Amino acid sequence: MSSSHPLWSKRSLAAQAMGHVDPITKAVVPPIHVATTYIRDEDNAYSSGFVYGRPDNATVRETEAVLAMLEEADAGALLFSSGMAAATAVFQALDPGDHVVASKVMYWALRNWLMTEATRWGLHVDFVESDDLDALRKAVVPGRTKLVWVETPSNPLWTITDIAAAAEIAHAAGARLAVDSTTASPVHTRPLALGAEIVMHAATKVLNGHSDVVAGVLAGAKADEFWARVVSIRKMQGAILGPFEAYLLMRGMRTLHLRAEAQARSAMLLAERFSDHPKVARVLYPGLPQHPGHDIAARQMDGGFGYMLSIQLTGGEAAAIRTAARVGLWKRATSLGGVESLIEHRASIEGPGTPCPPDLLRLSTGIEDMNDLFTDLDEALRAA
C-alpha cells in the first residue's frame, strides 16, 4: 500500500520508500521477500505476478520503483548484482559489429572490459574525450554508431560532458546515449531529462551510501525493443540483485538527499580550501569556477557538484603515495560515496594505460566534520 501524492517531492518519496505500508502488518518499513518460487493457480497461471526468483522479486521491485521515481524513468529501473553487471548488460544488448563511442576517462574496470571482453563480443569501441563536443561529433559515425556512453563527472578527473549536447550528437547519428551518473547521483543530475535513453549507477556508491552493498542499476527513458533486450539479459544471465541487498539499498536511499547534499557541501569547501594549499598544485572539482566544465556543470547539476574531487600534489607521485599513507580520519580504501571519507592513489591502482596522473589523489567526501577532514589531510600533506 502506498500513500504517495503527485505533488510530493522526490526527497519526501525517497525518505518514505514511496510511502509503502505493508498491507498485512501495517509496518512502515517494507519487508524482505526471500522466496525463490511461487504457487501456481489451478489453471497454471501466476495471478500474483511472480514466477521465480531469478528474473523477479518483490523487494527488488519496490527498490526499483524508488529508483525509477528518482530518475523520472518511464521504462522503469532494473537492479543488478553490481555496477559492472548493469553497465555490461547495455553493451551486451548490442549486436556484434556495432560501433560504440565511450568516454576516455571513466571507471577503470569498465574501460578495461570495453578494451578486452567487448571486442571479443564483436563490438568496435572508440574512446574519446567526451567533454570535447567536436571530438565526440567526429567520433560518432552516422548509421554505424549504435551507442554513445559517457561518464559525467568522469572518474577520477571529474571532467564534465554536456549531456544534452551529447544526446543531440548521438541521436543525429541514429545512436542511443547512455550516461554513467554514479558520481552525480539523481540528487544532482537527471540524464534522462536531458535526452539520454539510459542512465547507469553503481548503486554500491552514494545511492546505498554505507559501504555494505554491491549493486548496480539501469533506468530507462522508454520501454522499447532495446530496453526489452536489457531486461532479457538480466533474466537469462541471472544478474538480478538479491532481496537482502535490495532491502539495504532501499534503506540507504531513504537518507540519500541528506547525505548527497551534505557530502557535496563538504567537497565544495574542501576544494576551495585546498586550492590555496602550498602542497597542492591543482584541485579537480567541477564546483570551482576555474574548472573548465564549471559552466556546463552549473547548468546540468542541481544543488551541488557531487561528493568527489581530486588533488594533484606539488611533490609528485612519491608525495601523493606518502600522503595517502599518513592520513588518519580519511581511510585509504577503494570505492566512493559512503558516509566515511576515502582517499586513494588511483594511478597505482589502475596500472599501465591509466589516464590518471601519477601525482593525483582521489577523494571521496563522507559526512564527517569538514574541518576535521581538512586538518587530517593538511597534516598528512605537510608531513609528506
Image: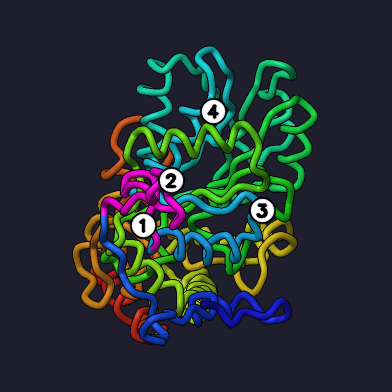
Real-space Cα separation, disc 3 to disc 4, in angstroms: 30 Å
For the point 37% across and 47% down, which residue is it? 51
Helix, strand or loop at mark 3: loop
Real-space Cα separation, disc 4 to disc 2, in angstroms: 48 Å
Real-space Cα separation, disc 4 to disc 1, in angstroms: 24 Å
- The x and y percentages for residue 253 are 45, 72
Q: Earlier in the sequence, mark 4 or mark 2?
A: 2
Query: Which residues are drawn in magenta?
Result: 36-58
Helix, strand or loop at mark 1: strand
- The x and y percentages for residue 331 are 24, 68
Is there CB contact under 8 Å for labels 3 and 4? no
**Which of the 4 image quadrants contains residue 43?**
top left
- The x and y percentages for residue 16 are 50, 82
Q: What is the number of the mark on residue 96?
A: none
**Which of the 4 image quadrants contains residue 313?**
bottom left
Q: Earlier in the sequence, mark 3 or mark 2?
A: 2
Residue 262 seen in render: no
Q: Horizontally, is 196 left or right of 267 in the view?
A: right
Q: Residue furthest front?
A: 42
Q: Which residue is mark 4?
A: 127
Residue type at mark 2 is: Ala
Crowdedness near tag 4: few (<14), some (14–19) or many (≥20) residues, C-alpha within 10 Å: many
Q: Which residue is mark 3?
A: 74
Q: Which residue is mark 1?
A: 361
Q: Nearer the viewer, mark 3 or mark 4?
A: 3
Helix, strand or loop at mark 2: loop
